[in-house]
Amino acid sequence: MSADVRAGVSVATGTPPRLQVLVLNGPNLNLLGTREPGHYGAATLAQVEQDCRTQGQALGFDVQCQQSNHEGVLLDAIHAAGQAHREGRLAGIVFNAGAYTHTSVALHDAIKGTGVPVIEVHISNVHAREAFRHHSYLSPVAAGLIVGLGTDGYLLALQALALRAARVSKV
Ligand code: DQA
């Protein structure tokens, strides 16, 4: 392995690799585009993810997207992102945990345990909906929340992580 690669520097350009961001979506968000468009809009998950990659590029991020309907897979993704964050390779996670938001102590513990910055996103205004959507296990351990701004919320969350990363790199 070359010294440049060991030092985390691109041999081709001599510039450091871009900070990663994980855009993580939980259960049923693969149904975006057809699922309750009155709440979640018309964009498909593929379109949302493409918009995130484009926005990430403009902000200097390498955006990775993942969706799972399985809590354990989401936990593993948070653990891996936590490791990347500790190694200085990842700025944070933009996370829409779907219904697990309202049920999952395990996701709360994973975010807290890894210390990875998470911006919690909800497409719909959960506070204007059923009472069971008003409580979030993630909010107490999230770096911030964006709720009710449609799929623009993902793009705003990426901007929030960029501002946060710039602030952190100055101290
Ligand atoms: C959601 C809100 C949750 O209550 C719901 O279970 C979802 C989507 C949102 O993006 O508005 O699956 O997280």
Image (spheres, rainbow, N blue to C red):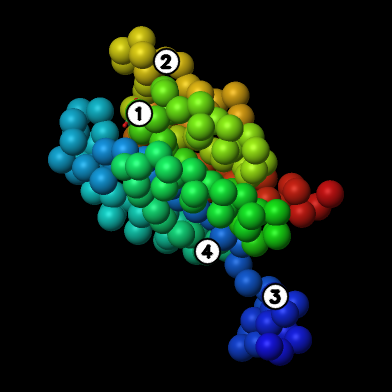
Foreground of the two, 89 or 165 = 89
The relative height of residue 151 versus residue 16 in the rendered view (above or below) is: above
Q: Secondary structure at mark 3?
A: loop
Which mark is nearer the camera, 4 or 2? 2
Disc 3 to disc 1, C-alpha distance: 38 Å
| Most distant residue in the right direction | 171
Foreground: 7 or 13? 7
What mark, if any, has residue 134 been given in the picture? 2
Residue contact between numbered discs 1 and 2, judged by CB atoms under 8 Å: no
Horizontally, is 126 left or right of 6 in the view? left
Q: Amino acid at mark 4?
A: Asp
Mark 4 and mark 1: Cα distance apart in space: 27 Å
- Pick whichever of labels 4 and 1 is earlier in the sequence: 4
Distance (Cα) linking label 1 and label 2: 11 Å
Distance in Å between CA atoms under marks 4 and 2: 32 Å
The residue depicted at 58 percent of the width and 32 percent of the height is: 109
Q: Is residue 44 above or below residue 39?
A: below
Give the class, few, some or many, for how many residues have Cα within 10 Å of label 1's Cα (few <14, many ≥20).
some
Q: Which label sits on residue 18?
A: none
Q: Quadrant of residue 98?
A: top left
Q: Which element is circle 2 on?
A: loop
| Mark nearer the viewer, 4 or 3 | 3
Q: Is mark 4 within 8 Å of ligand 1?
A: no
Q: Amino acid at mark 3?
A: Gly
Q: Which residue is mark 1?
A: 99
Report whether 61 appears left or right of 5. Answer: left
Report the residue marked by disc 4.
Answer: 62
Q: Is mark 1 within 8 Å of ligand 1?
A: yes
The earlier-in-sequence mark between 4 and 3 is 3
151 in relation to 18, above or below = above
Tell me if label 3 and label 2 are in contact, CB under 8 Å: no
Q: Amino acid at mark 1?
A: Ala
